[in-house]
Amino acid sequence: MSDARPSGAVLALEGVRKSYNVGTPTETEVLHGIDLQLSRSDFCALIGPSGSGKSTLLNLIGQLDSPTSGEITLLGVPTSGLHDDERTLLRRRALGFVFQFHHLVPAFTALENVLMPLMIGHGKPRPDDRERAQTLLDDVGLGEHAHKKPAELSGGQQQRVAIARALIAHPPLLVADEPTGNLDTQTADGVFALFRRFHETLGCAVLIVTHDPRLSDRSDRRITLVDGRIAEDTAGQPSPAPGPDAAAKQT
């Protein structure tokens, strides 16, 4: 795999289609020629009704599945010809994931959960890795809870641990799948404020899949997916007025 460095688009999709049961009488095309680019300056919400193809598109962007046709490029690297190990390495270098369900390891402390992506990469964490993880926990307001296990944390606190974990490798693209779906309004505002802060301070592109219009309306760019096609993309349009800064409302 070539060692391309990010220049221009962090993510580019060109003519991406995805079908299931290919070659059978029940073949179904879910995505119909998706063209999309994200740069580091993008703070995007991906919205659309249930069944529109959002989860399928997210799996393709996350390199958890492959398109039936078309090309997905991450950090300038075309992914269609990559072997599984190359795909894994690129995903680890390019992407940070935050899910609706936090997927924290119950037996690990908050600090150890944040360190997990680096431990998978090179085994036992180095002292500077631990320092970076502690700094991230400080940044999300959980520095004093670093040695607590997930069961000792609230849902909002667990989600903030998951955000710190997604950022530990400083990915150029942060992808969040319904990250506030299980949170109350005040806690969701705090999580959104964290995404906004890290987008501005770390310079990473952010793509949030959400059904919450409060979040999508406060994003700089909104991409609407309907029936497997991009029905609207507000790229290049004036940004909405910023929502209230809820960083102080973290729970």
Image (cartoon, rainbow, N blue to C red):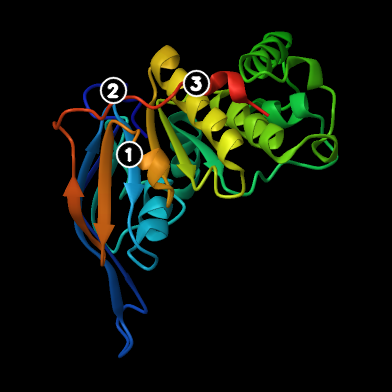
Q: Percent from the top left, x then y, of residue 196? A: 43, 24
Q: Quadrant of the N terminus?
A: top left
Q: Is residue 26 above or below residue 35?
A: below
Residue flagged by tag 2: what amino acid is it? Ser
Q: Nearer the viewer, residue 177 or 132?
A: 177
Q: Is residue 80 above or below residue 125?
A: below
Q: Quadrant of the C terminus?
A: top right
Res. 170 mark? 3
Q: Mark 1 sits on what residue? A: 217
Res. 41 mark? 2
Q: Nearer the viewer, residue 206 or 95?
A: 206
Q: Nearer the viewer, residue 116 or 211?
A: 211
Callout 3: 10 Å neighbours few (<14), some, many (20+)? Answer: some
Q: Percent from the top left, x then y, of residue 57? A: 35, 55
Callout 2: 10 Å neighbours few (<14), some, many (20+)? Answer: some
Residue flagged by tag 1: what amino acid is it? Asp
Q: Nearer the viewer, residue 245 or 34?
A: 245
Residue flagged by tag 3: what amino acid is it? His
Residue 119 in sight here? no
Label 3: state its secondary structure. loop
Q: Percent from the top left, x then y, of residue 20? A: 36, 74
* Image quadrant where residue 30 sits: bottom left
Callout 1: 10 Å neighbours few (<14), some, many (20+)? Answer: some
- The label nearer to you, 2 versus 1, is 1
Q: Percent from the top left, x then y, of residue 170? A: 50, 21
**Marks 3 and 2, how far apart at CA:** 15 Å
**Marks 1 and 3, how far apart at CA:** 26 Å
